[in-house]
Amino acid sequence: MRGALSGLRVVERCGTMGQYAGKLLGDMGADVVKVEPPGGSEARGVGPFVDDVPGPNRSLGFWYFNTNKRSVVLDLGEAGGREAWMALVGAADIVIEDGRPGELSNLGLGYEEAAARNPGLIWCAITPFGQDGPWARFEATDLVSLALGGAMMMNGYDAEDAEGAPPIRGHGDQGWLTGCHYAVQGILAALLWRDRTGEGQFVDCSVHEAISSTTEVALPYWFTKRVDVIRQTGRHAAAAPTERWLYRAADGRWTLIFGVGRDNASWKQIKEWFQGEGFGRQFDEPRFDEPLNRQVGRGSPEAAEIAMELERFIAAHGAEEVYRGGQERRQAWGVVRSPEENLADPHWSDRGFWVAVEGEGREGSPVRMPGAPYRFGATPWALRRPAPKLGEHTAEVLKEWLGREM
């Protein structure tokens, strides 16, 4: 079966910042050609590596972010490499690049030059701060992007957990991944426009702006009340301290509790569960009947009392029992799981989520990696090929796309 984007040709010239955008398109069926310099993308040098042995084809991160792509090596410092680049983008539907603003244009290899030959081309540039403006040429890592975008201001710990603790970065290149998600949304919107008009266009994706649009409550609080939110352990930042969401169970594991009895039907079930084991006797009092009184973050004594009883209840039960019992009563409760616990959970396997990926050093002994993040009924996500070895497909792509022999 064909993927949703089968038939689309994508040229990707990205390092660590923009590579996820190409993966998202490739995993949906697009033919993604990753153009790399002779030494390979910088992403090939990011560990961990297979058996802790570095090498251009052994980065496990590269394996994940570059599935369903083909690798072509071009030296844009040479006339032959520049000519091949322009031929490839002339044959492409989409270009994704994450170089500095003007980097390719200064070589005569940018969007304007490509669009003159290929007016239906969609060109997406992913940069830290966009193509123009006073910060356009500033450098940024994922950490810097999260800091300047505002997300880090909201992540950290309660003062009683870690007094004076600084803002905390969410790990895993969350800023860059956010930018890539927005880039793909922009590309898909541009494709819809091209389907109607035949016109391509330039998509300017700023990671800074993508992150700033996902800071949830911080910006609304400042815009409306000129109030800065405070960081809290394992829960939303807020203008004032709210009841905790993390509680340690009897087996020492942590549970995360998002709300308790937000509607009267589920509250009745929670009451019966607690009271059947000797907790929350006061919950039958009329003051607990109003849902708003039970909601965290509103400063009500009822919410504080519920949190105290919840802590006592969880401390007397195992984490899985709390999790399963809460879910049975339609509560958004969960367990804080370790990586090995997630790998062993049958839910993932029952859904067919994991995929097996081979590469250098693991031939015939694949590693398990996350698979489809969504399901299509008619055009399924598919792992068609593992991440490419450096330059593995140069001759193949030049012949297939351009009719050239190496």
Image (cartoon, grey):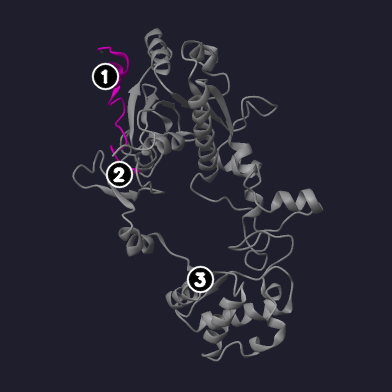
Residue on which the image places disc 1: 395
Label 3 SS: strand
Q: CA distance from mark 2 to mark 3?
A: 34 Å
User: Which amino acid, by three-letter code, is at mark 1?
Assistant: Ala
The residue under the point 55% across, 37% down is 141
Q: The C terminus lies in which quarter of the figure?
A: top left
Residue on which the image places disc 3: 255
Q: Earlier in the sequence, mark 3 or mark 1?
A: 3
The residue under the point 59% across, 74% down is 260
Q: Residue furthest left?
A: 364
Position in image of residue 134 (x %, y %): 70, 27
Q: The N terminus lies in which quarter of the figure?
A: top left
User: Which amino acid, by three-letter code, is at mark 2?
Assistant: Val
In the rendered view, would you say 10 is above or below 327? Answer: above
Q: CA distance from mark 1 to mark 2?
A: 27 Å
Position in image of residue 341 (x %, y %): 37, 64
Closer to the camera in the image, 260 or 226:
260
Magenta span contains residue 394:
yes
Q: Residues within 10 Å of mark 3 (few under 14, many from 20)?
A: many
Residue on which the image places disc 2: 50
Label 1 SS: helix
Horizontal arrangement in the rendering, residue 399 relative to residue 312 (left or right)? left
Tell which tag, 1 or 2, sits nearer the viewer. 1
Magenta-drawn stretch, dominant element (helix, strand or loop): loop
Q: Earlier in the sequence, mark 2 or mark 3?
A: 2
Q: Residues within 10 Å of mark 1 (few under 14, many from 20)?
A: some
Evaluate if marks 1 and 2 touch, with contact meaning CB atoms under 8 Å apart.
no
Tell which tag, 2 or 3, sits nearer the viewer. 3
